[in-house]
């Protein structure tokens, strides 16, 4: 009898192990499918958005033609956002939501949020004002989309629950500390102040429960649409190292606040001008550029973009050609695709380090449709210096070249 129970227990454990392994494999296959899907969709989008950026700068376009190209470009950007949303849904479901930090122009970012909120406030005939400290950083390195989700959710709620009066959006610079020669940490405080219905003090804790909001002036909980919600905003804020706090009084309005330490680049990048090319840029930043890319469309797009910036670039089809070319002539920077035949971008980077070492090698920038956070980490872990995901934006290339020059300057000083 005892032996039979032992055998049953062993069998149950084996079945549990098989079930667990199947679940792990299913999740792995799902992640791999989404990664591949993202890559395959981004590749044609790179062609669409790249050509749209180039065409927008043509001198003899009529206003109607420019408007049509703008429609193509913004529709492509919208499709790219939808692709990112699909990936986000998967990460939320699997409990593997990750931050995707990237450089972006902070004042421009805030102004875009203001434009969205001005429109919403105007529809309700309430005043919307903003005040940004003059010392806020220019270029920050953070998850732009997640920060945008938090702020639009807080501002959207403030406008939604304010029928008379105003909503104020305040961004203060608190302090700054050095991190290294390239970065510092800037403590920024966001405040959203409204004269709306307010929240009963007994109900304040409830607003951060999943899928719940306090109804207007009644203290009752109700679901509000399919937005991000305060619960998920709070989770993202915590992932970014902060916490959303609230002070509110029924019928007197609310103050929501969030303090974050934002990683700030000391190098000041040019203003983002995605649709304008500076043909003299290569004279300001004279470097020799190699592009390692096997896709013919992407080769043409990259060649045209760099030509509009004044560069003559050499294009190779894979890592083997890149290594062979470097042995004949050294280049300052390689924009490196990851998925290439014969020798991919990661293995090529390792080979470059082995052949030329840290000090004599070219600067290596990943230029790839592999856009998952783990892809970026993998590129940097093998020694790549920077990472740009496709579809390519002109200002990202400009910023990466500026960063290269800044590092060169710091190494000499």
Image: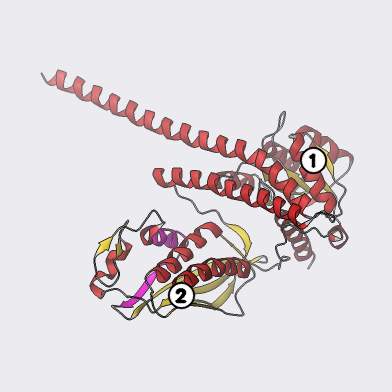
| Image disc number at residue 184 | none
Which callout, 2 or 1, points at the residue further toward the start of the chain?
Answer: 2
Image coords of residue 171 (percent x, y):
52, 76
Using residue 112 as the reference point, say whether residue 281 is left or right of it: right
Which element type, helix, strand or loop, lies under badge 2?
loop
Mark 1 Cα-neighbour bin, 10 Å: few <14, some 14–19, many ≥20:
some
The residue under label 1 is: 300
Foreground residue among 303 and 152: 152
The residue under label 2 is: 125
Foreground residue among 291 and 407: 291
Q: CA distance from mark 2 to mark 1?
A: 50 Å
Quadrant hosting residue 198: bottom left
Foreground residue among 133 and 403: 133
Foreground residue among 385 and 232: 232
Please tell me which residue is depicted at 55% across the width and 47% down the height of the picture: 373
Image coords of residue 413 (percent x, y):
78, 68
Image coords of residue 35 (percent x, y):
55, 38
Q: Does the magenta segment cover residue 233?
A: yes
Please identify, in this view, whether the residue under mark 2 or under mark 1 is nearer the observer: 2
Q: Which residues are magenta?
A: 232-249
Mark 2 Cα-neighbour bin, 10 Å: few <14, some 14–19, many ≥20:
few
Please tell me which residue is depicted at 57% across the width and 39% down the height of the picture: 38
Using residue 195 as the reference point, say whether residue 108 is left or right of it: right
Q: Is residue 239 visible?
A: yes
Q: Is residue 293 above or below residue 289?
A: above
Quick one: quadrant of the N terminus?
top left
């Amino acid at each position: 009898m005892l032996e039979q129970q032992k055998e049953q227990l062993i069998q149950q454990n084996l079945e549990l192990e098989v079930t667990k392994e199947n679940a792990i494999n299913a999740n792995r296959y799902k992640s791999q499918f989404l990664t591949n899907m993202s890559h395959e969709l981004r590749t044609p989008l790179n062609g669409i958005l790249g050509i749209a950026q180039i065409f927008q700068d043509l001198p003899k376009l009529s206003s109607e033609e420019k408007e049509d190209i703008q429609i193509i470009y913004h529709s492509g950007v919208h499709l790219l956002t939808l692709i990112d949303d699909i990936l986000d849904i998967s990460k939320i479901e699997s409990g593997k939501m990750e931050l995707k930090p990237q450089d972006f122009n902070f004042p421009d970012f805030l102004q875009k949020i203001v434009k969205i909120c001005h429109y919403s406030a105007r529809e309700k005939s309430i005043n919307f004002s903003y005040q940004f400290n003059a010392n806020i950083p220019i270029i920050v390195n953070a998850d732009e989309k997640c920060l945008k989700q938090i702020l639009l959710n807080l501002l959207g709620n403030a406008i939604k629950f304010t029928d008379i009066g105003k909503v104020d959006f305040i961004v203060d610079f608190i302090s700054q500390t050095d991190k290294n020669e390239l970065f510092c940490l800037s403590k920024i405080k966001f405040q959203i102040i409204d004269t709306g219905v307010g929240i009963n003090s007994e109900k304040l804790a409830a607003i951060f429960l999943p899928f719940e909001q306090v109804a207007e002036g009644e203290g009752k909980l109700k679901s509000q649409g399919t937005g991000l919600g305060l619960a998920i905003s709070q989770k993202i804020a915590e992932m970014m190292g902060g916490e959303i706090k609230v002070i509110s009084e029924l019928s007197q309005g609310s103050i929501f606040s969030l303090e974050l330490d934002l990683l700030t680049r000391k190098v000041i990048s040019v203003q983002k001008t995605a649709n304008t090319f500076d043909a003299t840029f290569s004279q300001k930043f004279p470097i020799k550029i190699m592009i390692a890319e096997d896709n013919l469309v992407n080769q043409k797009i990259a060649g045209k973009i760099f030509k509009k910036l004044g560069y003559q670039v050499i294009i190779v089809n894979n890592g083997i050609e890149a290594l062979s070319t470097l042995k004949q002539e050294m280049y300052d920077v390689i924009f490196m695709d990851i998925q290439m035949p014969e020798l991919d971008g990661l293995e090529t980077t390792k080979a470059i380090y082995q052949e030329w070492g840290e000090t004599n090698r070219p600067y290596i920038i990943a230029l790839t449709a592999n856009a998952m956070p783990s892809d970026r980490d993998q590129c940097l872990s093998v020694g790549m210096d920077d990472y740009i995901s496709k579809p390519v934006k002109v200002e990202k290339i400009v910023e990466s070249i500026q960063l290269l020059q800044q590092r060169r300057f710091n190494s000499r000083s």
